[in-house]
Amino acid sequence: MMKKLIALLFVTFLSVNLFAQKAEVEKAYTKEIKNLTLEKQLEKAFQVIDELEAQSQSDLVLLTEIEAPPFKETKRALKYKEMLEEAGADRVWIDEVGNVLALKKGTKGGRTVALDAHLDTVFPEGTDVKVKYKGDTMYAPGIGDDTRGLVVVLTTLRALNKAEIQTEADLLFVGTVGEEGLGDLRGVRHLFEAGEVRIDSWISIDGGSIGRVNNQGLGSKRYKAIFKGPGGHSWGAFGLGNPHHAIGKAIDYFTQDASKFTAEGPRTSFNVGRMGGGTSVNSIPFESWMEVDMRSVSPDRLNQIDKIFKDAMNRALVDYNNSGIKGEKLTLVLEQIGDRPSGELATSLALVQRSMAATEYFGEEPSLTRGSTNSNIPIALGIPAVTLGRGGVGSDGHSLTEWWLNKNGADAIKLALLVTVAEAGLDKNRKISNK
């Protein structure tokens, strides 16, 4: 337990010191949130969330144990659709790219507020996703990121219906595909580029404990660089161009130039994450490839390091081909495998203020953060969007030892419901029954 606590504190320290900033909550929004929590419908909804704790835990186990590898989320999506239908909505469907959507109509319409979590995990097909326990702590790949987020969205819909809450704006409950890795936000990207429902406000559930209000998108560009040549025997064809040798020169050029660039100015990073190629130790490879990730808080800086990368790759190709190799020249293919936009929303925006005020209501200090989440897309488009924490306590995300503990986890669900209702507007004319 001490090891988990130290890991959690270290992750929290990094996130707070590298990405978080404080902002003042305007009194008008503090008052709005407080008044909203005094409404009978909200009091009942919070009570329902507490009563649903056992079911929420059961839902978490059920969904975690359904594999959802990148680009293979269908099985989990079908089950999540079934669960949203059971929770109650006016319409539930799966769209062209695999997103699960549940629409709950408002009394006025004209606006749509979305509450989202992503279906996919980073783990490949065949990973053991059986939930295991050590005391009250739950262990399983993907249990926190972002299966717990799916449960927050689902339980919010259940609580709204059981508490007979009606909002003025329409509500859209979403389980998105393709948030992780090479999915490149394909699910949320589709919703804003070609989705049938126009979304006016976006709330994602992702990340750790409550307190985080992510209103800034961390942009990234990702490439697969492939150097190609004729290949041959290491002795008999010695002297032919070797893609491994060329890619080594390319990495050296890129690292030198990118290191100088990232040493100053708005925070920017680069990483060579994966490499491959070749057939045997005694063969000149016909192909050598690497995958590169570049990130920046600044759209301009991201474009600049993108150019630095491309220039380094092409310079290495030319220099290597002019180094005296025999036979056929090497070629280079740059395949873009990721493009997440940067962006930032003003702290004065109503959704951001409501999220911070609601966070304070639950006794936590809100921190404005920058991250790479589904919110990147609407943030870059200037559409009100935040990403909120899934609650509880957990760590080791993206690893086989990922764990989650339901410590005050219900507060995160109440927070999500409160922010959603505040943004959509509560229909105060709706009378709740005594059942």
Image (cartoon, rainbow, N blue to C red):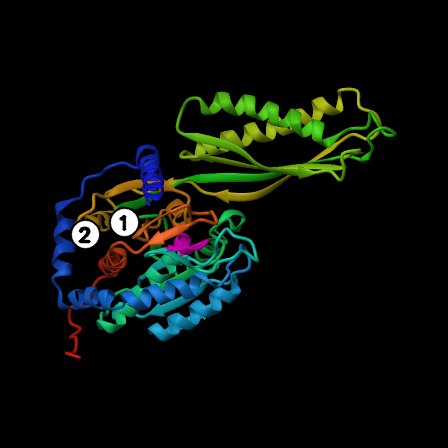
Q: Disc 1 to disc 2, how far (Cα)?
A: 9 Å
Circles 1 and 2, Cβ within 8 Å, touching? The answer is yes
Q: Nearer the viewer, residue 422 or 111?
A: 422
Above or below, 125 against 212 in this view is below
Give neighbour class at mark 2: few <14, some 14-19, many 20+ (Cα, 10 Å).
Answer: some
Task: Verify whether residue 145 appears in magenta.
Answer: yes
Above or below, 302 against 157 in this view is above
Q: Nearer the viewer, residue 168 or 248?
A: 248
Tell me which numbered mark, 1 or 2, is placed earlier along the sequence: 1
- The percent position of residue 191, horizontal first and vertical second, equals 44, 58
Farthest residue to the right: give it: 236
Q: Which residues are magenta?
A: 138-146
Residue named by callout 1:
210
* Quadrant of res 113: bottom left
Q: Residue at x 83, y 26 (%)?
A: 238
Q: Residue at x 47, y 60 (%)?
A: 130
Q: Report the amino acid beneath label 2.
A: Phe
Q: Residue at x 46, y 35 (%)?
A: 295
Would residue 367 be seen by someone viewing this image from the given angle? yes
The residue tagged with tag 1: helix, strand or loop? Answer: loop
Q: Report the amino acid beneath label 1.
A: Ile
Task: Verify whether residue 306 appears in magenta.
Answer: no
**Disc on res. 362:** 2
Q: How many labels sit on residues?
A: 2
- The percent position of residue 46, horizontal first and vertical second, equals 20, 64
Give neighbour class at mark 1: few <14, some 14-19, many 20+ (Cα, 10 Å).
Answer: many
